[in-house]
């Protein structure tokens, strides 16, 4: 049981380590889900939007970390 607790603690730390990244992804997924539920976009376009959103968020996080490391 101790191993399972350690795994959950590490997963929690991983997702909370960069709160901006976590919240941005969650908001993006909620936005795409709302667009899909309102029949504004189809499933194919919703998937494409999720991919583009995740790549953009990842690129922003990498750029932010690069700027932070250069400033040190």
Image (cartoon, rainbow, N blue to C red):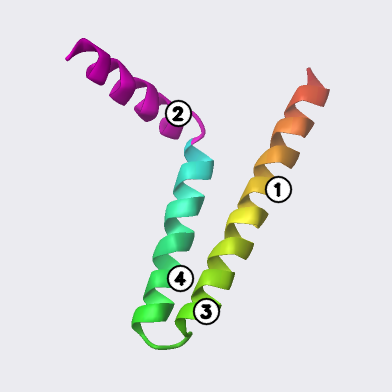
Alpha-carbon distance for marks 4 and 2? 24 Å
The reply to whether discs 1 and 4 touch (Cβ–Cβ < 8 Å) is no
Q: Which residue is mark 2?
A: 14
Residue 70 is drawn in which quadrant? top right
In the displayed structure image, the side of residue 63 where residue 57 appears, left or right = left
**Rendered location of residue 32, percent (x, y):** 45, 71
| Mark carried by residue 32 | 4
Element type at mark 4: helix
- Closer to viewer: mark 2 or mark 3: 3
Q: Residue at x 59, y 62 (%)?
A: 51
Which of pointers 4 and 2 lies earlier in the amino acid sequence? 2
Q: Residue at x 75, y 40 (%)?
A: 63
Q: Which of these two is toward me, 1 or 54?
A: 1
The reply to whether discs 4 and 2 touch (Cβ–Cβ < 8 Å) is no
Q: Quadrant of the C terminus?
A: top right
Q: Which residue is mark 1?
A: 59
Q: Residue at x 39, y 71 (%)?
A: 33
Alpha-carbon distance for marks 3 and 4? 11 Å
- Closer to viewer: mark 3 or mark 1: 3
Alpha-carbon distance for marks 3 and 1? 23 Å
Which of pointers 3 and 1 lies earlier in the amino acid sequence? 3
Which of pointers 1 and 2 lies earlier in the amino acid sequence? 2
Does residue 22 lie above or below 37 as drawn? above
Q: Residues within 10 Å of mark 2 (few under 14, many from 20)?
A: few
For the record, the magenta segment spans 1-18
Element type at mark 3: helix
In the displayed structure image, the side of residue 37 where residue 68 appears, left or right = right
Q: Which residue is mark 3?
A: 44
Does residue 23 lie above or below 13 as drawn? below
The reply to whether discs 3 and 4 touch (Cβ–Cβ < 8 Å) is no
């Amino acid at each position: 049981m101790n191993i399972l607790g350690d795994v959950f603690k590490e997963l929690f730390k991983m997702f909370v380590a960069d709160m901006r990244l976590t919240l941005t992804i969650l908001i993006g997924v909620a936005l795409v889900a709302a667009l899909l539920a309102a029949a504004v976009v189809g499933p194919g376009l919703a998937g494409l939007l999720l991919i583009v959103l995740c790549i953009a968020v990842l690129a922003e996080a990498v750029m932010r970390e690069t700027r932070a490391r250069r400033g040190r």
